Image (spheres, helix red, strand yellow):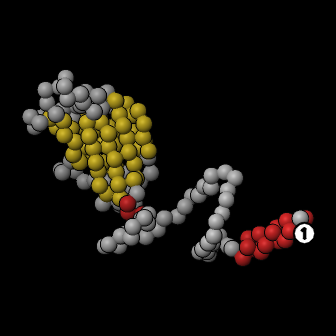
Amino acid sequence: MRRFVRRIGDIGKVIAAALSASSNETITGTWTFSTAPTIANPAITGDAPATPTADVLYRDGLVRGWVETSGGGAWTIDDDFNVSSITDNGTGDLTVNWAIDLPNANYVVIGMSITDPFTSDVGTILNARSNTTKLVGSVRISCVSTAAAGSDPTDGVCVLAVGG
């Protein structure tokens, strides 16, 4: 039995010596881990082709940042990813500032207001302001009521940026 275990250890050393961090290697077969495997700092490169491949992660499809706030007009960050702060520019007007710049300004912004529709007589629509440019470091958001007036949602907003 010792001889068998020693031989398996030797095979592991050979496999480890043959693999390098800079090469792309494929290992097939069944592998059993005593703990959940993790990937530290993966490098995701390449933009998605016109017809993306299923189950492949592309750089331009990543979530770049998101934020959930509370307090309409008194923007408190409840939770976030890659958001350093929010600037209140006035009623229904805020800027989300990214902690780390996005790769470019060609990202998608998705937003929603957090408002109880049963206690509020008007809905609120969020949109990236068309009269300002999305920047790699920030995006300016308008909150507009269905009556077309600037409005701070009573319970906050959620904003998400994808791509870039």
Placement of the C terminus among the 4 image quadrants: bottom left
| Residue drawn where x is 23% and y is 27% of the image | 116
Q: Is residue 13 visible from the viewing direction of this image?
A: no
- In this view, 45 is above or below 76: below
Q: Where is residue 111, by image quadrant?
A: top left
Q: Where is residue 87, by image quadrant?
A: top left
- In this view, 161 is above or below 48: above
The residue closer to the viewer here, 132 or 10, is 10
Mark 1: give few (<14), some (14-19) or many (20+) Cα within 10 Å.
few
Placement of the N terminus among the 4 image quadrants: bottom right
Measured as percent of width and height from the top left, residue 132 is found at 22, 50
Which residue has dot 1 on it?
A: 3
Measured as percent of width and height from the top left, residue 64 is found at 40, 53
For residue 102, side relative to residue 15 (left or right): left
| Residue drawn where x is 37% and y is 51% of the image | 137
Measured as percent of width and height from the top left, residue 115 is found at 24, 30
| Residue drawn where x is 43% and y is 70% of the image | 46
